[in-house]
Every structure is written in structure tokens, then in C-alpha cells.
Image: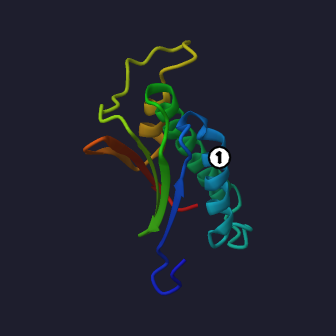
Amino acid sequence: MDPGTGESHWHFQFGPDGTRSVGPGMGCVRDVLAALPGADDSDGDGDGAARRRDDVLLVACELLANACDHTPGATCLDVDLADGHLTVAVTDPVANRPLPGPWRPGQPHGHGLHVVEQISTEWGVSPFPGGKTVWAALPTP
């Protein structure tokens, strides 16, 4: 972390089998959260900070799982801390833009982007030749 600006960037590259990126990716996000100021709850915010950490983990899990379910898998994960927000970004090798499907209560699958949409302050897709990055920004825990 840059102590002068409070900004940081973490980059994690996945191996050739990106379909197995959820577990390692979640480990990376947990490591990032543990490295953030106040991770030991010394700020006294307690439940609020814990809830925000859980939100980051849930959004990261959804983005990674979507990459594994709908593409050959995630190629990398980036986490950025800036301006009071933590941005989680998952890159995969398919350019198709993900869209939330219809809301189907009682169905076990198909709600991931709805969850991301509700929990994050904003989310989006950045396409590039040969793939895309799906990202979501959340308040810093």
C-alpha cells in the first residue's frame, strides 16, 4: 500500500486451467482483506467492517464463479484500493458481455449478477480483443 495515497493494486494470474480459479482467487481476496488497514478491527467498527469484508468476498466469489461457469475460466484477478473503494476485477477470455438473467425466486442458480448489482456501489464490463474484465466496486472494509 502506498502510505501517501492509500492506494494499492494486487494482481493474481491463474494457470492454464482457469476453471479452478474460484478457490485460489478467494484465497487471494482473503489475503488482500487481511492486509488492509483496520483488518484487525482496531478501528472499532466491528460489525460494519466485517459485513463489508463479507460483501467483498461474496462479490469476488460470484465474479469468479461466473467466469468458471460461462467461459473457459478466469485468467486473472485484480483488486484495487482507491478513493475509499475496493474494486474486484475478474478477466476471462470470452468477449460476450454478461447480463443479469430474469429473477427466478426459488431457483438455485442464475442470481450471481443480481447479487453483484445489489451489493456493489457500481459494476461493469470492460471488453477488449480476446476477452473481457468484469469488475465491481464496493466500499472499503
Residue located beneath label 1 in the image:
24
Q: Is residue 53 left or right of residue 87?
A: right
- Residue 127: image location, x then y, percent: 27, 44
Q: Name the residue located 49 percent from the left edge and 30 percent from the top edge.
A: 112
Q: Amino acid at mark 1?
A: Pro
- Looking at the image, is 125 positioned above or below residue 53? above
Tell me the SS state at disc 1.
helix
- Residue 58: image location, x then y, percent: 58, 41
- Residue 80: image location, x then y, percent: 46, 63
Q: Is residue 46 left or right of residue 55?
A: right
Q: Residue furthest front?
A: 16
> Which quadrant would the N terminus be assigned to in this image?
bottom right
How many numbered discs?
1
Q: Name the residue located 59 percent from the left edge and 53 percent from the top edge.
A: 52
Q: Residue furthest bottom?
A: 4
Q: Name the residue located 66 percent from the left edge and 71 percent from the top edge.
A: 38
- Residue 46: image location, x then y, percent: 71, 61
Residue 141: quadrant of the picture? bottom right
Mark 1 surroundings within 10 Å by alpha-carbon count, few (fewer than 14), some (14 through 19), many (20 or more): few
Q: Give the colour scheme shown.
A: rainbow
- Looking at the image, is 67 positioned above or below residue 86? above
